[in-house]
Amino acid sequence: MEITKDRVIKICQIGAGLIGRERIKATISLLESGRNIKLCAVHDPYLKDKPDVLRKHDLHFADSIEEVFSFEPDWIFISTPHDVAAKLAKLALSKGYNVLLEKPMGRNIQEAEAIASCQIRKDQLYVGCNYRFYDGIAAALRDMDKKLFGNIVSVNMTLGHGGNPKDRTSWKLDPEKAGGGVLIDPGIHLMDLCKCLFTGKIQVKKVLTWSGFWNTGIEEEAHVLMQSGKSIINLQLSVVRWQSTFRIEINGDEGYGIIEGRGRSYGRQRYLRGRKWGWLSGGRQKDTEELVVQTEGDDVFRKEIEALLYGSPKDLIRPCPGLDALTSMKLLEECRENIRSP
């Protein structure tokens, strides 16, 4: 979307739950930094009381989606449960609004394609796959672009939620509302990163899933084996790990990169880079590794929104367009078709 320098960019936020509040805070942070934007209204029919962030900043709470449209916003950010988000996205897109839709792009490939078909112009839809904007991941993507690791042998990604006893009643464990289990959420984040790491076609080789703790009808752990060219891709996803875990290993024939943590209960993010046979220069291999990035990872929403509103299509790290998100949803569908239960 082309923005003139001095024009105010009007934004409306739909959904003020956990992620919606993060979007609101990030938008306010950009406004306070001097960006020429305005958060016109927030709409969430499921909230009985205004969240603290709305009261603190005296934000307007819209009573309906029609009231949201009445502000004629430049962007509508949608951060609602998956079963609600698809309908809202289709409505907003069909009316010509630019949309940032929280991941995933629908609960299945049929919903994703239906959402995509509602666009009336190019680049109208973006999807909030914001792992791209973690400093450590962004640095690793730049290193991959420079071919710093040589030919990629394998990429291993692990994402496990520690969880909470209250999760049993959460919509995220409801197969109808969430659209599935760990393959779709948080799995779609890692599938998006696979798309960023590899330009070639990604083929699904084998998917094993496990369930039996929460017993809500979703897959609670999944191990996915894929391949792009000669490179092996290994994903491990879980909501029964008990210890919040995030780790990415990029292994090449010239070196490697390791990313651990993504903030909060996962610990601060650290990106380490290592050379092949670094130990030959003396000492242990581990001692030759370079700490490239260390961050709390609490600014990814702000970075994603700023790139959405002011970034260039030529930027290496940019928000996820609808076309990329649709590709990831097709990969998710292929994973589902290859599920084998142990």
Image (cartoon, helix red, strand yellow):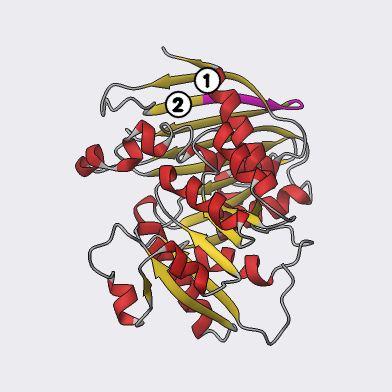
Say if the magenta span includes residue 225: yes
Q: Amino acid at mark 2?
A: Ala
Q: Considering depth in this image, is 135 or 181 the residue closer to the camera?
A: 181
Identify the main secondary structure in magenta: strand
Q: Of helix, strand and loop, which one carries label 1?
A: strand
Any part of residue 273 in sight: yes
Q: Residue at x 43, y 44 (%)?
A: 82
The label shown at residue 221 is: none
Q: In the rendered image of this protein, does residue 337 appear above or below residue 29?
A: above
Q: In the rendered image of this protein, does residue 130 appear above or below residue 187?
A: below
Q: Considering depth in this image, is 288 or 96 the residue closer to the camera?
A: 96
Say if the magenta span includes residue 243: no
Q: Residue at x 79, y 51 (%)?
A: 146
- Label 2: which residue? 222
Magenta segment boundaries in residue numbering: 224-230
- Label 1: which residue? 207
